[in-house]
Image: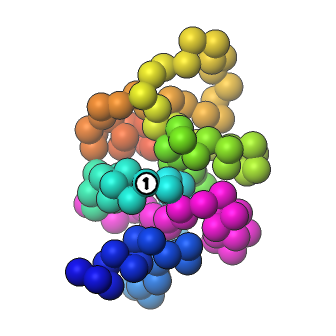
Amino acid sequence: MRLEVELLASDRPAELTAPVSGDDSQRHTVLLVAEDADVRRYVRECLRDRTDLRVLEASTVAMAERLVAAHRPRLLIVDARDAAVLRAIVDVRAVLIADDAPLDATPSGRIVTLVRPFGGRDLEAFIDALLS
């Protein structure tokens, strides 16, 4: 358990398992940006059966920028408390997880807002729409 706590508190991205030969061409890289470990855990749980997605995690904007440079994700999933990453990474579509729908939001096609509480099917529908 101590190791898990240390990993969650770490500023380094989690070690990634080696991909199975030939499966990268079928997978979309998604970057989850959330300082809150519970948010990251919940999103991972929602997407655990999605073999077509390779989910990377970042707990800070700086870490997210490094991962974007190295892995070029097709989509960001961002906790609203970490929305500053959307100003730093402007060329990737995003799902913004928020407590309320923004009143002044104009749909841009780049960022969609998913309001809490949400379930796995809701998140998957947003991801599928942005990846299509």
Residue at 50% x, 56% y: name it. 35
Q: Which residue is label 1 attached to?
A: 36
Q: What is the tally of numbered marks visible in this picture?
A: 1
> Where residue 76 appears, x then y in whole percent?
57, 50
Instruction: Indicate the quadrant containing the N terminus: top left, top right, bottom left or bottom right.
Output: bottom left
Give the colouring mode of the picture.
rainbow
Q: Is residue 26 left or right of residue 92?
A: left
Left or right, 36 with respect to 107, comes to left
The amino acid marked with disc number 1 is Asp
Horizontal and vertical percent position of residue 5? 34, 75
Q: Mark 1 packing: few (<14 Cα in 10 Å), some, or many (20+)?
A: some
Picture residue at 44% right of the left edge, 87% below the top = 18
- Residue at x 30%, y 31% (from the top left corner): 117
- The reply to whether residue 106 is in sight is yes
Q: Is residue 74 left or right of residue 99?
A: right
Q: Is residue 59 magenta?
A: yes
The answer to whether 57 is drawn above or below residue 76 in the figure is: below
Q: Is residue 23 above or below residue 103?
A: below
Q: Secondary structure at mark 1?
A: loop
> Compared to 35, does 67 lie above or below?
below
Q: Position of residue 86 (x, y in %)?
A: 68, 44
Snapshot quadrant of residue 50: bottom left
Relative to the observer, which residue lies in front, 80 or 120? 80
- Extent of the magenta region: 49-71
Q: Residue at x 46, y 83 (%)?
A: 15
Which of the 4 image quarters holds residue 52? Answer: bottom left
Residue 71 relative to residue 35: left or right: right
